[in-house]
Amino acid sequence: MKTKIVTEFFGTALLLAIVTGSGIMGESLSAGNAAVALLGNSIATGCGLYVLISLLAPLSGAHFNPVVSMMFWRRGTLSIQALAGYIAAQITGAIGGVWLTHLMFTLPVIQTSTKPRTGLGIWVSELAATLILLGVIHLGVKYAQEKVAMLVALTVTAGYWFTSSTFFANPAVTLARSLTNTFVGIAPADVVGFVSAQLVSVIIICLLVRQKNE
């Protein structure tokens, strides 16, 4: 179990370093063009996810996301103790990844975002994004195990573009991104709305999975 927890910590940290670093780099090179910055951010995130899931899935399942771990707990493949360890590792890893990125780009390590992301449309977007992500993972594990890394990576890359919230779909990511005042940030006051939508999504998925199993 120790190996799994450590893997989730470092995997989530690397994911946030990819998300945050590519956002900073994309914004700095795009000459103010937000579409170009988002393109670079989404491609880097998708590529990074593919590599991380492919390499680390045999070690921990490569969840990197509390709602994914909750779904697997509901499926009976993760104990409640393991779930608690995974979530703690994911949250601390995500924050560590953001701080590491700040160091790499010579930015203040401790900061908070001022970027607003709120409103009914944004919350519905996060609800849909999280449902889609969890649905893809659930069906992928069941019917296309060898393609899960690619399926998740492509879903997240596309999600950056077809959702108004840019597809956070991850409470650990959401919390960590409130601690960076860069392209990928989210104002701390808006975290509750995002995480609430994400948690509602995992409840819906768990109910559907339960109904299907029964």
Image (cartoon, grey):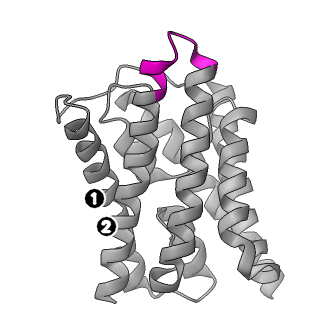
Label 2 residue SS: helix
Residue 164 shown left or right of residue 143 in the figure: left
Determine if residue 185 is in view: no
In this picture, residue 35 sits left or right of residue 115: right
Q: Name the residue that disc number 2 marks.
A: 88
Q: Quadrant of residue 177?
A: top left
Q: Amino acid at mark 1?
A: Thr
Q: On the image, numbered disc 1 is attached to which residue?
A: 92
Compared with residue 56, is residue 93 higher up or lower down, i.e. above or below? above
Q: Residue at x 29, y 49 (%)?
A: 95
Label 1: element kind:
helix
Q: Residue at x 69, y 68 (%)?
A: 137
Marks 2 and 1, how far apart at CA:
6 Å
In the image: residue 194, left or right of residue 155: left
State the extent of the magenta-drawn residues as a range.
Answer: 26-35
The answer to whether 139 is drawn above or below residue 121 in the figure is below
Image: 135 above or below 156? below
Residue 163 in percent (x, y) is at 71, 34
Q: Is residue 193 above or below residue 11?
A: above
Query: Farthest top residue?
Result: 32
Q: In this figure, what is the number of numbered marks?
A: 2
Q: Position of residue 57 (x, y in %)?
A: 53, 78
Residue 94 percent location from the top left of the image: 34, 53
**Chief secondary structure of the magenta span?**
helix
Name which quarter of the figure residue 103 lies in: top left
Dividing the image into 4 quarters, which one contains the N terminus?
Answer: bottom left
Q: Which disc, if any, is residue 60?
A: none
Q: In which quadrant of the rendered image does the C terminus lie?
A: bottom right
Q: Type of residue at label 2?
A: Ala
| Residue 35 visible here | yes
Residue reaching furthest to the front: 29
Residue 78 locus on image (x, y percent): 50, 86
